[in-house]
Amino acid sequence: MVMTGSDPGDDPRDAAAGKAGRPGGAGAHKHDWIARQLRRVYDEALEEEIPPEMLAILGKLDEPTPGREGGA
């Protein structure tokens, strides 16, 4: 998966091209870029629908198991 951002400042190579004067330097810029990309991927995953097969499996977790009564 190629992670590209829409902002010109999203390119981590910008950190090496003159961002060192900023507090935190190039490392902070790269960290910010990674954080934005992770947030974008996470947000996209939240928007995806849960497949019906997965919902069926999750539904089985709510069903009582025959022969087992509460307690371990």
Image (cartoon, rainbow, N blue to C red):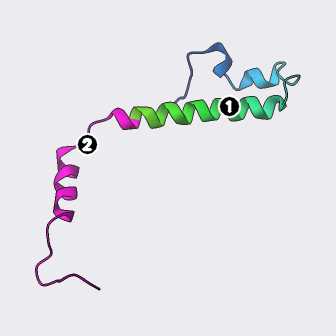
In this rendering, position of residue 58 left or right of residue 37? left
Category of crowding for the residue at label 2, using alpha-carbon neighbours closer than 10 angstroms: few (below 14), some (14–19), many (at least 20) = few
Q: Position of residue 61 (x, y in %)?
A: 21, 64
**Which residues make up the magenta segment?**
45-71
**Sequence-earlier tag: 2 or 1:** 1
Q: Which residue appears farthest toward the top when viewing the image?
A: 8
In this rendering, position of residue 27 left or right of residue 68? right
Q: Position of residue 17 (x, y in %)?
A: 81, 19
In this rendering, position of residue 35 left or right of residue 42? right
Is residue 53 something that shows in the picture? yes
The residue wearing badge 2 is 50
Q: Quadrant of the C terminus?
A: bottom left
- In-front residue for pair 69/33: 69
Label of residue 32 in the image: 1
Residue at (50, 30) in percent of width and height: 40
What secondary structure is marked by label 1? Answer: helix
Residue at (64, 21) in percent of width and height: 10
Q: Are marks 2 and 1 in contact (CB under 8 Å)?
A: no
* Number of marks in picture: 2
- Determine the image quadrant of residue 5: top right
